[in-house]
Image: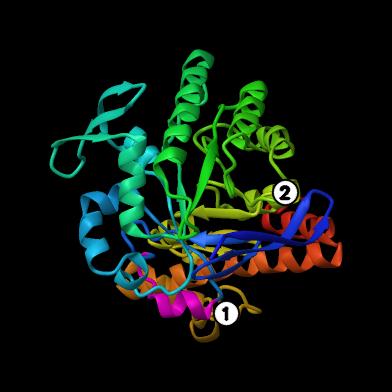
């Protein structure tokens, strides 16, 4: 099966579409929960399906180290291994290599670094990343890229050049057989000309989709939005656009307005493990004393299992008692909240009312006067 992106409606720059893959169709805009180690922390695949998740992300670097991509391949690939029948996306491992490891050497051919688990020396190249992702068997895979912290222009320029060279090598190493869709990754920090240059070059390689990397890594929100304003118009309208690592509800709204289709982030499960819940009135910390006698659900109109059955007082008790059920219930709700947010934006695009939805959502979520 070939990968196709079907554009169903637009509202300003925002788009509602469907990205068709061999393991199912993905309605866009879409938020993908992150299953770094082939599991969305605390959440079984059954629950993801029931709450409407249509895409899950897994991590190439971590799965290469543990249990090993060849083991996953020999056991039937990621879909069978993690019992998730729907579409899966894997990143290239580049971000983890540059952010988590002790790097020994970066050169034009790849990166030599130390395994963060046992300290052994490893080497990632574009070809290695492609081989690992082919073994994992995800539907959507990423080019190996260099993700610089967006400060020094000289460093960012070098990273863009390497990202382009590596994208070319990934394209050559990846069989274009309709089994996996390889996305190119636009880099360039917060420099408008480098972003435009990167988006323009990658299109010459003819990818079925394009990711925007190197954002949400320390720059201000406004700098991220400004960079999207420059980058998105330089990408083709008939291909999906994926903003990597972004998942705050207000950022999702701003990026959808600008024309982004796909998102992923560890945030909803990470903050859940620290006792925080996402609500239409913003993020709340359930450790706070104010919730000790609060018999109301996190969100009265939410249909998730957590909100249908448990009070803030009970959730606070679980959090303060360090009960594992707190991780499950809060992760479940937080993912459900973001999936519903995306579905509501998709409906608003179809109805031509996205700006009104976003204005109303942000005023409440950010507690604007």
* Residue 95 horizontal side relative to residue 368, left or right: left
Element type at mark 2: loop
Q: Is residue 47 magenta?
A: yes
Of residues 288 and 67, which is closer to you in this image?
67
- In this view of the protein, can residue 323 be seen by the observer? no
- In this view of the protein, can residue 158 be seen by the observer? yes
Residue marked by disc 2: 259
Image coordinates of residue 174 in percent, x first then y, are 42, 46
Residue marked by disc 1: 296
Q: Earlier in the sequence, mark 1 or mark 2?
A: 2
Mark nearer the viewer, 1 or 2: 2
Of residues 135 and 173, which is closer to you in this image?
173
Above/below status of 352 relative to 120: below
Q: Is residue 312 magenta?
A: no
Magenta residues span 41-51
Total residue callouts: 2
**Residue drawn at x 41%, y 57% as measured from the top left:** 270
Image coordinates of residue 171 in percent, x first then y, are 47, 40
* Residue 87 horizontal side relative to residue 36, left or right: right
**Residue drawn at x 56%, y 75% as measured from the top left:** 52
**Disc 2 crowd, CA 10 A, few/some/many (<14, 14-19, 20+):** many
Above/below status of 179 relative to 316: above
**Disc 1 crowd, CA 10 A, few/some/many (<14, 14-19, 20+):** some
**Residue drawn at x 51%, y 67% as measured from the top left:** 335
């Amino acid at each position: 099966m070939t990968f196709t992106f079907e554009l169903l409606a637009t509202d300003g720059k925002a788009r509602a579409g469907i990205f068709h893959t061999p393991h199912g169709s993905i309605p866009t805009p879409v938020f993908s929960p992150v299953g770094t180690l082939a599991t969305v922390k605390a959440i079984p695949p059954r629950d993801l399906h029931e709450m409407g998740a249509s895409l899950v992300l897994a991590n190439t670097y971590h799965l290469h180290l543990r249990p090993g991509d060849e083991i996953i391949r020999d056991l039937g690939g990621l879909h069978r291994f993690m019992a998730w029948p729907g579409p899966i996306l894997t990143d290239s491992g580049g971000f983890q290599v540059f952010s988590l490891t002790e790097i020994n050497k970066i050169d034009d051919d790849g990166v030599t670094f130390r395994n963060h688990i046992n300290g052994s020396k490893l080497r990632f190249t574009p070809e290695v990343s492609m081989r690992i992702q082919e073994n994992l068997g995800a539907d959507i895979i990423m080019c190996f890229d260099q993700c610089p912290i967006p400060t020094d222009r000289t460093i960012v320029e070098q990273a863009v050049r390497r990202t382009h060279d590596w994208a070319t090598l990934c394209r050559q190493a990846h069989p274009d057989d309709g089994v996996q869709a390889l996305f190119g990754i636009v880099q360039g920090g917060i420099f408008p000309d480098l972003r435009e240059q990167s988006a323009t070059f990658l299109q010459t390689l003819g990818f079925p989709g394009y990711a925007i990397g190197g954002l949400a890594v320390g720059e201000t929100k406004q700098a991220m939005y400004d960079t999207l304003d420059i980058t998105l118009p330089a990408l083709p309208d008939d291909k999906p656009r994926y903003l990597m690592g972004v998942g705050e509800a207000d950022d999702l709204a701003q990026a959808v307005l600008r024309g982004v289709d796909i998102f992923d982030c560890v945030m909803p499960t990470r903050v859940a493990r620290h006792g925080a819940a996402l609500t239409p009135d913003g993020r709340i910390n359930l450790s706070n004393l104010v919730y000790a006698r609060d018999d109301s659900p996190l969100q009265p109109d939410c249909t998730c299992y957590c909100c249908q059955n448990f009070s803030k007082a009970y959730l606070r008790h679980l959090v303060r008692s360090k009960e594992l059920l707190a991780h499950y219930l809060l992760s479940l709700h937080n993912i459900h909240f973001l999936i519903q947010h995306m579905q509501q934006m998709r409906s608003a695009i179809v109805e031509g009312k996205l700006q009104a939805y976003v204005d109303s959502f942000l005023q409440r979520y950010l507690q604007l006067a």
